[in-house]
Image (tube, coloured by chain):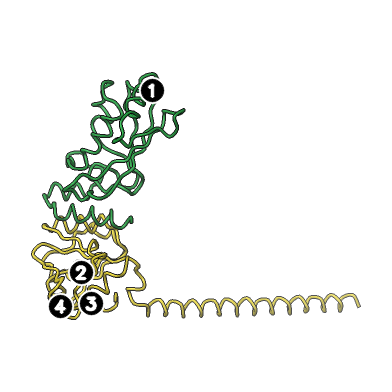
Amino acid sequence: MAPSGRRTSTSRLIGYGAALTIAIGTTAWLLWNSSKDEDKDMRATNTSQLYKSKCIIVTNSASDSPNIKWAKILADPNVVLIIPPKVEFPQSAYENHVVDSKDIYKIIHCNTMAGVWACVKSLKKDELVLNSNDLGENVPVDIVRYVKHISNVEDMTSVLDEVE
Amino acid sequence: MSRLIKEYKTINAQDDILLFPETADNLNNWTAMITGPPNTPYEGHDFKLYISIPDAYPNSPPMVKFHREAMPHVNVNYETGEICLDILKGEWSPVYNLLYTVQSIERLLSEPNADSPLNLELGILMREGDKTAYDSLVRYYLQRQK
């Protein structure tokens, strides 16, 4: 009788082991699957949600556009505009460009390109938005130490739509 | 300490100076309020200075700081409030006093010195001669604090 009893307890142990393995496997699969979904959600999230604070270098293509609602963009406390030399910020040219006087301080005018990059480095915002073609010069290599992400865009209007 | 008591009495007798010890019994820690000079981006703003007196005063200079993240200036470390001014370091003389020190710091606001920057980016703007960007950036930091 004794050997048969030992067999019963051994098979019970094997049963428990198998059940435990299945439970751990199922849990691991569920966790892996849910993290995959989260990754998908993250990828779907647009950049404006990923990066909280923004520094936007306003170049001519953006400043000439009547469609960008600067007042709305500047109402966000985490946005700063940098105006490079020879670029006019159209404060009154278009209706949408009229910025609330309390937000004017978020528009930083520069007379030199060295000044533009010094401002970007000082501000240390999460995201730098610019159009390097429009800017006419390359982004300094060390800028990546001061911002988390650089959005170098052809069409600034579409990016600024996201900011709004 | 007798020198500090003398300074305290002199400062106390003047109404227009905002320089006072933490308590009348403790002259080792002082506070001063300075006003942003006209025609500078600091105009319209007041700034607090924290002054601590070392044991060796007046043979050693007082230790003076702005509040942390309150003073965007080329000669001030924005994060710590540390000030780079010659009389607070090697150029100190026992003939200087607290009032002279505070007035010198007030003067520094309208006469920034690009040769000894503690704020590197503002130092670049000064050296590049980009006063527009310097003033814009200073105003941004000051306004953001409000």
Residue type, mark 2 in image: Leu
For disc 3, the marked residue is A69
Question: Do residues under tags 1 and 3 come within 8 Å of each other at their CB atoms?
Answer: no
How far apart are the two marked residues, 3 and 4, measured between alpha carbons? 9 Å
- Dot 1: within a 10 Å radius of its alpha carbon, few (fewer than 14), some, or many (20 or more) residues? few
| Labels 4 and 2: the sequence-earlier one | 4
Question: Do residues under tags 4 and 1 come within 8 Å of each other at their CB atoms?
Answer: no
Residue B54 - label: none
Number of the front mark, 1 or 2: 1
- Which residue sits at x=11%, y=58%? A111
- Measured as percent of width and height from the top left, residue A93 is found at 12, 75
- Please indicate whether residue B69 sits to the left or right of residue B138 in the image: right
Q: Chain of mark 4?
A: A
How far apart are the two marked residues, 1 and 3, measured between alpha carbons? 60 Å
For disc 4, the marked residue is A94
* Residue nearest the observer in this picture, B120 or A87: A87
Palette colour of chain A = yellow
Residue type, mark 1 in image: Ile
Secondary structure under tag 4 reads loop
| Labels 3 and 4: the sequence-earlier one | 3
- Measured as percent of width and height from the top left, residue A11 is found at 77, 79
Q: Are marks 4 and 2 on the same chain?
A: yes
Question: Do residues under tags 1 and 2 come within 8 Å of each other at their CB atoms?
Answer: no
| Residue furthest out toward the top | B2
> Residue B75, located in which quarter of the rendered image?
top left
Residue type, mark 4 in image: Tyr
- Dot 4: within a 10 Å radius of its alpha carbon, few (fewer than 14), some, or many (20 or more) residues? some
Residue A28 vs A150, above or below: the answer is below
Number of the front mark, 1 or 3: 1
For disc 2, the marked residue is A130
